[in-house]
Image (spheres, rainbow, N blue to C red):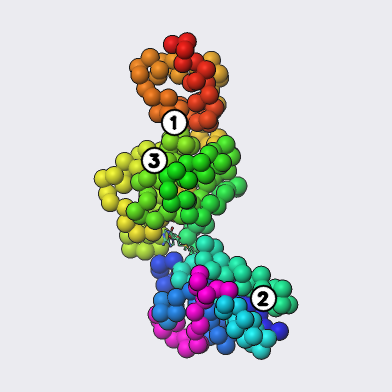
Amino acid sequence: MGILYLVATPIGNLEDMSPRAVRILRQVSLIAAEDTRQTQKLLHHFGISTPLVSYFEHNKISRLELILNRLNEDDVALVSDAGTPTINDPGYELVRAALAAGHSVCPIPGPSAPITALAVSGLPTDAFLYLGYLPRKSAERRPFLETVADLPYTLLCLEVPHRLLASLSDLEAVLGDRTMAAARELTKIHEQIIRGPISRVRAHFEQHEPRGEFVLVIAGKTENRERWAEERIIQAIRAGLTTGESSSRLAARLAGESGWTRREVYRLIQANKEKV
Ligand code: SAM
C-alpha cells in the first residue's frame, strides 16, 4: 500500500518551500499537480525530476483510478498551484478515495494563504470561520453574509481583485463597519496588509486599483464593540431618521457602531419609523 502525500508549496516566496517537501517530491514515483506547467517550474527550481500528471477541477474524478492504481504500487504526492492542496483546491475526493482504498494519507504542511492572512490580521485567531470564495453576485453574496452576521467568530474569505470593491460594500452593508484586514500578495514583493474599518479599506482600494491575490479577514460579531443599551440605539435611530438617512444605510452604520446586528437594527428602525 502506498502513501498519498499532501505537499504544501509556496504561495509566492520560493524560500518558503520546506526541505521535507523537496525530499518527498523527489522520493515519490508520481506527482499529481493542479497545473503541470506551473509545478514543472517549481520542480525545476529545486532540481526535482519526478514525473507529473495533471489533477485539476475538471479531471479530478476521471484521474482517480490512475492515481489509485499507482498508489497500489508506490507513493504519490499531490500538490496544487500554490499553498496547501485541498484548501479551495482539488484533492478532497482523492484523499477520500485513497483512504477508502486503505492507503495512508500523510500531510507535508507548509504555506496556506488563508491561515497566513489570519495570523497577521491582528484579529482574534482562537475561533474563526473560513468561507472560501464569497458568492460572485451581490444578490447571492448578501443573503450568504446574513447567515454569518451574528456569529462571534473571525471571518476569513478569499476574493479576486475585480470583485473586491463590490464585496467590501456588501460586507459593510450586511455586517456593519467592522474591523478587518485585507491581505494582498502575501510573501511576494508587493505584499500589503491594509487594516481598519471595512469602509476605510474600501476607500483605500477605491483610490488604488485592486491587483493581485487577496484574503479578507473580518472581525466576528462582538470584536471591538460593546453592545449598546436599547434606549441608546433607539435614540440614534430616531436621530438618523430625522436627518433623512435611508433605513438600509442607517442599519449598516449603526450595526457597526452599536454591536447590534444589521437585522436587529433594521427591525428597530421599522418599529420606530412612525414615531419620528
Ligand atoms: N490552497 C491554497 C492555499 O492553501 O493557500 C488556496 C487556493 S485558492 C484557489 C487561491 C486564492 O488564495 C487566491 O484567489 C487568493 O484569494 C488566495 N491567495 C493565494 N495566494 C495568495 C497570496 N500570496 N496572497 C494573498 N492571497 C493569496
Q: Amino acid at mark 1?
A: Ala
Q: CA distance from mark 1 to mark 3?
A: 10 Å
Q: Say which label, 3 or 2, has the lower sequence index.
A: 2
Asked whether residue 44 is drawn in magenta, I would say yes
Kindly identify which numbered label has been placed on residue 160: none
Of the numbered discs in the image, which one, if any, rests on residue 98?
A: 2
Q: Position of residue 248 (x, y in %)?
A: 43, 29
Q: Residues within 10 Å of mark 2 (few under 14, many from 20)?
A: many
Position of residue 252 measured from the top left corner of the image (x, y, whole percent): 44, 31
Q: Is residue 19 above or below residue 72?
A: above
**Majority secondary structure of magenta residues:** loop
Residue 252, label in figure = 1
- Report helix, strand or loop for mark 1: helix
- For the residue marked with disc 3, what is the amino acid? Ser
Query: For the residues marked 3 and 2, what is the alpha-carbon distance in whole angstroms?
Result: 42 Å
Q: Quadrant of residue 179?
A: top left
**Label 2: which secondary element:** helix
Part of the protein shown in magenta: 41-61
Q: Between residues 69 and 137, which one lies in front from this camera angle?
A: 137
Which of the image's four quarters has the C terminus? top left
Whether residue 133 appears in magenta in the rendering, the answer is no
Residue 1, picture quadrant: bottom right
Residue matched to label 3: 169
Q: Is residue 178 above or below residue 238?
A: below
117 over 94 or under it: above or below? above
Which quarter of the picture shows residue 20?
A: bottom right
